[in-house]
Amino acid sequence: MSIQKFGIALFASSMLATGVSAASLNVAIDSSPAGLDPHLITAFNSVVVVQGNIYEGLTDINADLDVVPDLAKSWNVSEDGLSYTFTLHDGVTFHDGSTMDANDVAASIRRVQAESTGSPLASRVSPITGIEVVDATTVKLTLDAPFAPILSALAGIAIVPEELENDIEKLQQTPIGTGPFKFDEWQPNGYIALTKFDGYREDGLPKLDGVRVNFVPEAATRQVGLTSGDYDVLPGIDPATALQLQAQPSVSVFDTRDVAYTLLGMNATRGPLAEPKVRRAINMLLNRQEIIDGALFGAGVPGGPLSPALSSWALDTSEFDCYTPDVDGAKALLEEAGVDMPIKLSILVLPRQDARDISQVIQQQLAAGGIEVELVNKEIGEFVQDWRNSDFDMFVSANGGNPDPDQYFYRTFYSGGSTNVFQYDNPELNDLLDKGRSETDQAARKEIYDDVQRMLACEGPVAHLAYGNLFTAVNNKVEGFEIYPTGRLTSLVNATME
């Protein structure tokens, strides 16, 4: 995958203004995470802290979206595709000094599967029906049917200590993993501090003494802090900020095609939104290019159910007739649906500038078709809670993508799926999704997910809006940084400071 880097001048500084040593790196994000439990989190501000830094999985996804070994150094697959036997690295320890072994792997998978946990990742491991600890460094997973994306799915399942299997509170505040950095301190209105894990399994890593993730609500403050040297990395910045920072000689802006996407989510049980024709009409009222130009400064492409970064899976949006803006056609469809006009709905808005801008454009576009929209702005904790509880008519947000379609589609759109907050129930789609995860022939899987995309694009509970460029701004005194399409800061393990 190509990675474009803007800016070439170097900026030197022996000490950060925060007083942290030059061997520590300062990240700035817009708000404090809602929690840090890797099996419960969904928000970007939580993921950027823990995934790849504090926690690791059996497998990992690299910058090219390929599955690579992580805590499992190798694996064998049975001829019938129903058993996967993983061999773990020996001598791996958790940050509390305890040894990580196959029992911890088994407990972590059971924890995600458990209904009492309520993990949004549950569907990723639902086909696993047997977990056998063969010995301390060997674990065997048995499936109820072939599950093509299992290796990719396991990359998202962090391994935690066995004794926390039934605890759904401790890890939200004090995470314990095997990653290169260990949790040190959380100042709720200030920062989260991570320190170098001296017991990390890879010799010579991490190279930094620590990472401090600062909570800085004002975008302008984050920008000034980056150029002055107070902060070293601004992850997931919006296109407007990226454009401004590209002109700064002390800053490099990395970008890559994002597998994450912006969306308008719809509660399929709320009034007129329960009618597929209404959802199709909403799609027809959306002008995605106008949204990209007005809210994303042109940095993106109209988005279907899968990112164009997934070139072997994604259909071109030209296949979706509802993506052609058609106000008159949408009005006719609403009349055909027999709903009372005007339709009055609300949009719950993710507290992020691009989401706010997108919501305002959508509000104007839907008004043209007789849909009156109220924008509801809440802080991130309330937003996540309302999202989890399906307490919304519609919402505008940004969701992380995945390298395999199953990891997104199954949990999001399957009836009862772990992140099916839309309360969407489509038996025909369920059948396709079941077939997609059990089919191991690539060409046959492609045909199945082509049908899934066509079914969801216009009448599903999500109006996919745009796949933008993922931008991260980095002070030039940082070396070894690499941007990942998943948005994770995994490359900090190799980063150094001048």
Image (cartoon, grey):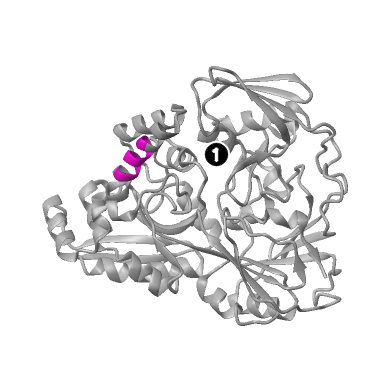
Compared across the picture, whether 238 is left or right of 228 comes to: left
Image quadrant where residue 153 sits: top right
- Identified by mark 1, the residue type is Leu
Which corner quadrant holds the C terminus? Answer: bottom right
- Counting from the top left corner in percent of width and height, residue 220 is at 60, 79
- Residue nearest the observer in this picture, 238 or 289: 289
- Residue nearest the observer in this picture, 481 or 2: 2
Look at the image and give the residue range highlighted in magenta.
447-454
- 448 falls in the magenta region: yes
Mark 1 residue crowding within 10 angstroms, few (<14) / some (14–19) / many (20+) = many
- 130 falls in the magenta region: no
Image quadrant where residue 449 sits: top left
Compared across the picture, whether 1 is left or right of 307 comes to: right
Q: Secondary structure at mark 1?
A: loop
Q: Residue at x 52, y 46 (%)?
A: 402
Q: Residue at x 74, y 67 (%)?
A: 26
Question: Visible in this render: residue 424?
Answer: no
Compared across the picture, whether 459 is left or right of 295 comes to: left
Q: Residue at x 69, y 49 (%)?
A: 52
- Residue nearest the observer in this picture, 477 or 271: 477
Q: Is residue 143 above or below residue 10?
A: above
Q: Residue at x 77, y 56 (%)?
A: 494
Compared across the picture, whether 222 is left or right of 292 comes to: right
Question: Visible in this render: residue 246?
Answer: yes
Image quadrant where residue 223 sits: bottom right
- Counting from the top left corner in percent of width and height, residue 239 is at 51, 72
- Counting from the top left corner in percent of width and height, residue 371 is at 24, 63
Q: Is residue 15 above or below residue 417?
A: below
Identify the residue under disc 1.
Answer: 121
